[in-house]
Image (cartoon, grey):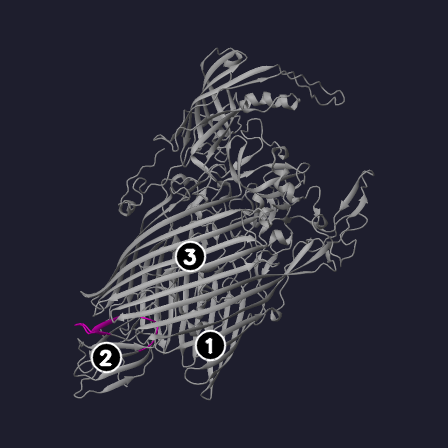
């Protein structure tokens, strides 16, 4: 959405000579993302749809924006975005719970820089690429059912060793006063144990679990009421109906 | 005695310039009734340098502007006519009075002296309000000693006497608005706090000749305020040396018995009482060069001391069951005082005021004024607590913490420098006014031991800790304090009994529980510097044309700057979790440069500024000399800038039209009927640029109690700050596992944002019913247009600044505040040894926003309060607002009884009666906490009772000679010591309950919280939490020369 309007009166700033470049318009928001979990829908672009790595429907992605240190304050003109996928980190946390010696290193999430300080004319901020993260998670043994509690089944199957890679590119974040980095799109290059696929990703903040489209229409569910969303029942989350900007 | 004036043409009328008065009138031939042109009209006064004179124009009309308030003698001379001289003409600031004269033609020059009462109707304006003279503020007990501006007896405290005005938490408000919305003016310079809008210079009435309060209906030359204009006019010197010395004292021992508020018991109970309040000072003014250069200077020192005495109380616990014993009626726990635990502390503040003024008249057409004010205030420190300068109240009301943690040293300075130049043409038809002013404030809150924010030693380097465990049980006070030596050894011993259900367990009940306690460091500290530079130029032209026109035009520029250095002692404020197993960084400044890569800041310093410019043009047109039409237009634009020097908020194109009509049916200046429409725009204070426009970067992490004990200052600054003492709190997909970051960015602004404004309609009439007295009635209607507030559409994930109901925020209700008032008033100025001011206001104030602060919580963040934050909280917010008092009666009177010709007995009194305000039924919100969810529509609770108070003043004056006098006085406030309820507990439950749209009291019976569980009703709901201030005496001594 753009909010250009004709000013009926002469902007006094020009008369004052105070704001030669900004004029009378309200300042734009600097490039940023919402902070928290995005509901992401994956659409396969290349790869075998029947393979394990090619059949992902979507994921919850944790995003946050970081700012460079301008000396005693954050430099809002120099932001970078981190993307942390739940799919990968479920493996990681299972391994850690089991006491597996796995250092929580940088490969649990990918980081990339914004190209600009302010959104472009279409209100998008771009992160062209992130680093490629590859994490090898060792095997985690199965957990047996505790015979002393016959009513409960604590058994968990074994988690085989796996190596997972993520690389993001063309990350576009919608940034304006009404949508403060709450819609995004990206390309994902995903690899797991030699199987490789690439996806087109769209995401919305925050994650809202759903069973029907009505759950996603609720104005108080936390998603901006003007966003066009629908319930992806296979995923169980509300996702964007269209490419960003996805509005009703 | 000749006739004062017969039927004459209505002389054009218009508002006088700020601070000065105007005399207008028509001179006619007594025999023929024809107007006399070229008559010379001159005035002299003790308050005027030299003499001022003009000649009447072809319609016999004259206008004498720029007259300082005071008592004048007017003389009219014309060849072929008698000379008429009239003394005792009283001029008030900003008033226009009309004096018509008829001259008898004579052959030889004679002089006729008139002694007639001075006109009392201000025929020049449509504004409502009150002019409070020195006589009034000295004889009538108005400025209560306690409260904001009480010790100083500041002009804002006195302004409360105005019909329709009332005290709110941060000052005096008029016409249903809030105090930060006013424009506080001293001699033409605006002295509002640049960051928060409240009054920044609490100048004492001792240095003033008048306090002029305009509560509505004012012309475009006054702009940028959606409240009223509170105008303080300082004294000037004179051709004779005059001055006074004074001292006032309010002893705490004579304070009436305070009614104690019953509340849930606590291990430490504080009983606040008045220690003493006093002020002393002197002023002197006189000539340096007679009739050319005058000086005026003054000094005052004021001090307030409150006692905050604390004792420990133990809860009574059944020794067999370990259950807490409770009162059958209130449900509160029963407590008893522990002997030997009494601690006496004070909360104190000292303030000094220094004023200096020079008035210079270069020649009869040019005059200059230079004014300087400096008001430093120090409070707290050295074992005492401080007073909050914004409210005038002690900084703590309880004793639940270490002194070092609760107490602070405050410094609040205000300074003003003002230069005015007024130039006129010989015939006084053109006036050029120029004003340049600088207002300065410094506000700092530092530790009580003298260390400063950022120091590495002293209390500034020690982090504070807040304890609040309640699960399974609260702390004992002995966890934080040693039992005083005078108390019995077992006073706070817990009661322990075996658990009847499981013999291996015990039930332990603390007898000295504290559910909240703060220790060690003083927490939040700041050092703020505020500046405002303003300049104004105004041109006034008086011309004939189908009657007369008084045309005014002007431009003004205003630059505000706010430097805010703030931080937390030791860099962090820790808070215990309710289970006691962890501590969080409750408040800490910093930001993340990468995942879990923290930059922790010791302090933050933001400098924000704003540029405002305005222009206006207005005409007061006396149509065919029968009726006056006021029409004008004002244009303002304001731009606020954040710390990064980028634009934060653009508020251009503020067009304020003003239209008014004044008709004097007597054509003699003895009555008026008026109506006025006006639009006012708000000047946005810099707090929004400092917080939303620059960001408030914060960081938090959680520390397990096993690895971090912040009560040990070494650990608090050492081990606790290592990652090894941080609990991983992130979920699998959280980018940061150890840290939570918030507030680093700016709050975006709706591109369609428009400035905040309010409209007003006023009708009224006045009539001079007897000498020096006038009766009037007015109707005012005020309503808000757009309001600027911050909001969230996604339940607190992201916020933006916008206009509720417009632009991005169309799913929010529009901001509303509607005020209707009918005021009936009688005003008789002090003459013939007595004065009387009475008013009866019937008003209705309803809406969904009170103004620039939230009375429910005391939050003062203009334009970014929590009123519109969340959609889930918006229901039920429309209703009668806290300032809605249907009936408000004020009666002020004073008189003196001469005894012989040298002595006087003086008496004065104030009677105030007011119906009670509305109360609400509130609950907690799961995100925002208490005082945020209106379970039932606003105002659904029972109305508070009527309040009634009587204040008296008794004095004795001995006049040694014409100039020397000594006065002894005694003010008694709340003579009857009436302790009516002024506030009740509005929290129906502390549980999280969402509003029930359109709910009624019946809906409370089966109320469930948002989790579906039945709520626990607060036993204190509806019970009083505050009473009227008790009776206080103020003794005074004044010597005048």
Looking at the rendering, in which quadrant would you find the N terminus of chain A? top left
Q: Where residue B197 appears, x then y in whole percent?
A: 43, 54
Q: Please report the residue visible at 69 percent of the width from the left and 56 percent of the height from the top.
A: B329
Q: Magenta segment, which residues? A: B53-72
Residue B884: give x, y in percent of width and height. Answer: 48, 58
Q: Name the residue carrying label 3.
A: B440
Q: Is residue B48 above or below residue B148?
A: below
Q: Residue at x 52, y 39 (%)?
A: B590
Above-or-below relation of B3 to B530: below
Q: Which of pointers 1 and 2 indicates the residue nearer the eye? A: 2
Q: Residue B40: image x %, image y %?
A: 21, 77
Residue B262: percent from left, percent from top: 65, 58
Q: Are marks 2 and 3 in contact (CB under 8 Å)?
A: no
Other-residue count near label 1 (Cα within 10 Å), few / some / many at <14 / 14–19 / ≥20: many
Q: Earlier in the sequence, mark 2 or mark 3?
A: 2
Question: The residue marked by circle 3 belongs to what chain?
Answer: B
Do discs 1 and 2 belong to a common subunit? yes
For disc 1, the chain is B
Secondary structure at badge 1 equals: strand
Label located before the other in sequence (3 or 1): 3
Q: Quadrant of the C terminus of chain A?
A: top left
Q: Secondary structure at mark 3?
A: strand
Look at the numbered discs 3 and 1 and tell me whether their residues touch, using CB distance below 8 Å.
no
Q: Which residue is mark 2?
A: B76
Residue at mark 2 shares a chain with residue at mark 3: yes
- Is B59 contained in the magenta span? yes
Q: CA distance from mark 1 to mark 2?
A: 35 Å
In the depicted view, which residue is nearer to us: B549 or A115? A115
Question: At 69% from the left edge and 36% from the top edge, which residue is drawn?
Answer: B706
* Above-or-below relation of B824 to B783: below
Tag 3: Cα neighbours inside 10 Å, few (<14), some, or many (≥20)? many
Residue indicated by mark 1: B894
């Amino acid at each position: 959405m753009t909010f250009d309007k004709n000013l009926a009166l002469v902007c006094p700033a020009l008369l004052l000579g105070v704001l030669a470049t900004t004029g009378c318009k309200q300042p734009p928001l600097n490039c940023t993302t919402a902070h928290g979990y995005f509901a992401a829908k994956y659409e396969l672009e290349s790869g075998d749809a029947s393979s394990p790595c090619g059949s992902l429907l979507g994921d919850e992605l944790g995003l946050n924006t970081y700012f460079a240190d301008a000396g005693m304050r954050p430099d809002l003109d120099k932001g970078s975005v981190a993307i942390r996928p739940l799919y990968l980190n479920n493996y990681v946390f299972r391994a850690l719970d089991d006491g597996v010696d796995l250092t929580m290193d940088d490969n649990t999430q990918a980081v990339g820089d914004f190209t600009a300080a302010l959104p472009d004319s279409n209100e998008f901020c771009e992160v062209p690429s992130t680093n490629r993260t590859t994490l090898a998670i060792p095997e985690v043994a199965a957990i047996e059912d505790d015979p002393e509690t016959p009513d409960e089944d604590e058994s968990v199957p074994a988690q085989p060793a796996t190596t997972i890679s993520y690389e993001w590119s063309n990350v576009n974040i919608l940034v304006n006063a009404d949508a403060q980095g709450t819609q995004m799109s990206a390309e994902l290059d995903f690899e797991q144990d030699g199987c490789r696929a690439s996806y087109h990703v769209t995401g919305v903040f925050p994650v809202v679990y759903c069973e029907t489209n009505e759950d996603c229409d609720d104005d108080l569910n936390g998603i901006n009421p003007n966003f066009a969303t629908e319930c992806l029942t296979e995923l169980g989350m509300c996702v964007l109906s269209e490419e960003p900007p996805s509005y009703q | 005695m000749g006739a004062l004036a017969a039927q004459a043409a209505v002389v054009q009328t218009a508002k006088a310039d700020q601070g000065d008065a105007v005399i207008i009138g028509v001179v006619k031939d007594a025999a023929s009734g024809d107007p006399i042109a070229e008559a010379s009209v001159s005035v002299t006064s003790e308050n005027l340098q030299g003499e001022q004179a003009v000649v009447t124009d072809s319609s016999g009309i004259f206008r004498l502007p720029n007259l300082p308030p005071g008592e004048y003698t007017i003389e009219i001379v014309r060849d072929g006519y008698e000379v008429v001289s009239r003394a005792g003409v009283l001029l008030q600031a900003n008033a226009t009075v009309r004096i018509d004269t008829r001259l008898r033609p004579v052959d030889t020059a004679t002089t006729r002296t008139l002694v007639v009462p001075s006109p009392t109707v201000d025929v020049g304006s449509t504004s409502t309000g009150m002019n409070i003279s020195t006589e009034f503020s000295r004889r009538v007990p108005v400025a209560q000693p306690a409260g904001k501006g009480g010790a100083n007896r500041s002009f804002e405290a006195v302004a409360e006497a105005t019909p329709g005005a009332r005290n709110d938490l941060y000052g005096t408000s008029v016409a249903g608005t809030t105090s930060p919305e006013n424009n506080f003016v001293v001699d033409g310079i605006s002295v509002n706090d640049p960051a928060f809008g409240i009054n920044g210079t609490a100048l004492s009435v001792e240095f003033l000749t008048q306090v002029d309060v305009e509560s509505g209906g004012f012309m475009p030359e006054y702009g940028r305020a959606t409240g009223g204009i509170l105008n303080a006019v300082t004294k000037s010197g004179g051709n004779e040396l005059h001055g006074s010395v004074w001292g006032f004292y309010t002893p705490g021992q004579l304070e009436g018995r305070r009614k104690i508020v019953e509340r849930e018991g606590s291990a430490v109970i504080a009983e606040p009482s008045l220690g003493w309040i006093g002020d002393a000072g002197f002023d002197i003014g006189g000539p340096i060069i007679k009739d050319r250069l005058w000086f005026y200077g003054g000094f005052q020192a004021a001090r307030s001391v409150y006692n905050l005495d604390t004792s420990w109380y133990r809860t009574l616990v059944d020794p067999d069951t370990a259950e807490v014993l409770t009162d059958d009626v209130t449900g509160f726990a029963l407590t008893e005082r522990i002997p030997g635990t009494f601690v006496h502390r004070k909360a104190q503040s000292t303030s000094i005021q220094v004023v200096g003024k020079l008035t210079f008249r270069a020649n009869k057409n040019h005059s200059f004024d230079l004014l300087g004010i400096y008001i430093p205030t120090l409070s707290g420190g050295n074992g005492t607590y401080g007073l909050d300068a914004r409210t005038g109240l002690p900084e703590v009301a309880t004793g639940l913490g270490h002194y070092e943690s609760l107490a602070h040293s405050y410094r609040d300075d205000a300074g003003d420098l003002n230069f005015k130049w007024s130039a006129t043409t010989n015939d006084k038809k053109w006036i050029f006014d120029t004003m340049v002013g600088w207002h300065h404030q410094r506000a700092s809150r530092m530790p009580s031991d003298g260390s400063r924010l950022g120091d590495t030693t002293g209390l500034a380097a020690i982090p504070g800790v807040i304890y609040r465990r309640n699960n399974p049980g609260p702390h004992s006070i002995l966890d934080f304090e040693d039992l005083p030596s005078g108390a019995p050894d077992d006073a706070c011993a817990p009661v322990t009994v075996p658990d009847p259900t499981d013999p291996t367990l015990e039930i332990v009940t603390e007898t000295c529980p504290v559910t909240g306690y703060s220790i060690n460091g003083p927490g939040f500290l700041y050092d703020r510097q505020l500046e405002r530079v303003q300049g104004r130029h105004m041109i006034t032209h008086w011309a004939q044309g189908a009657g007369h026109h008084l045309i005014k035009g002007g431009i003004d520029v205003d630059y505000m700057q706010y430097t805010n250095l703030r931080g937390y002692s030791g860099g962090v404020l820790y808070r215990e979790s309710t289970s006691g197993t962890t501590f969080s960084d409750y408040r800490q400044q910093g930001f993340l440069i990468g995942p879990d890569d923290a930059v922790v800041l010791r302090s933050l310093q933001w400098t924000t500024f704003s540029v405002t410019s305005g222009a206006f043009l207005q005409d007061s047109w006396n149509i065919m000399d029968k009726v006056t039409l006021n029409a004008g237009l004002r244009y303002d634009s304001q731009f606020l800038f954040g710390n990064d020097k980028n634009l934060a908020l653009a508020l251009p194109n503020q067009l304020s039209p003003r239209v008014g009509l004044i008709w004097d049916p007597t054509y003699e200046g003895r009555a008026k009927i008026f109506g006025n429409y006006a639009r006012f725009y708000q000047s946005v204070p810099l707090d929004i640029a400092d917080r939303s426009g620059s960001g408030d970067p914060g960081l938090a992490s959680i520390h397990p109690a096993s690895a971090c004990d912040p009560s040990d200052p070494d650990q608090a600054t050492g081990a606790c700050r290592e990652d090894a003492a941080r609990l991983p709190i992130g979920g699998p997909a959280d980018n940061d596992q150890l840290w939570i970051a918030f507030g680093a960015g700016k709050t975006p602004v709706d591109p369609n944002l428009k400035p905040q404004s309010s409209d007003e309609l006023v009708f009224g009439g006045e009539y001079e019913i007897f000498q020096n007295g006038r009766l009037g009635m007015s109707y005012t209607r005020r309503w808000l247009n757009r309001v600027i507030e911050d909001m969230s559409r996604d339940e607190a994930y992201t916020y933006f600044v916008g206009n509720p109901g417009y632009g991005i925020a169309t799913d929010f209700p529009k901001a509303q505040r509607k005020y209707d008032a009918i005021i009936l008033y009688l005003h008789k100025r002090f003459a013939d040894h007595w004065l009387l001011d009475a008013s009866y206001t019937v008003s209705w104030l309803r809406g969904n926003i009170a103004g620039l602060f939230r009375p429910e919580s005391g939050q003062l963040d203009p334009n970014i309060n929590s009123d519109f934050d969340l959609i889930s909280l918006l229901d039920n917010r429309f209703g009668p607002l806290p300032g809605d008092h249907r009936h408000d009666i004020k009666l002020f009177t004073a008189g003196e009884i001469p005894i012989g010709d040298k002595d006087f007995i003086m008496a004065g009194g104030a009677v105030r009666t007011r119906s009670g305000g509305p109360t609400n039924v509130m609950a907690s919100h799961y995100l925002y906490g208490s005082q945020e969810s209106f379970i039932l529509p606003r105002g659904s609770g029972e109305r508070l009772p009527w309040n009634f108070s009587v204040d008296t003043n008794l004095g004795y004056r001995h006049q040694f000679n014409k100039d020397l006098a000594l006065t002894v006085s005694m003010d008694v406030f709340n003579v009857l010591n009436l302790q009516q309820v002024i506030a009740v507990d509005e929290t129906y439950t502390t549980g999280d309950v969402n509003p029930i749209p359109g709910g009624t009291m019946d809906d409370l019976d089966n109320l469930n919280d948002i989790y579906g569980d039945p709520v626990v009703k607060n036993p204190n709901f509806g019970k009083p939490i505050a009473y009227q201030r008790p009776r206080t005496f103020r003794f005074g001594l004044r010597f005048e020369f």
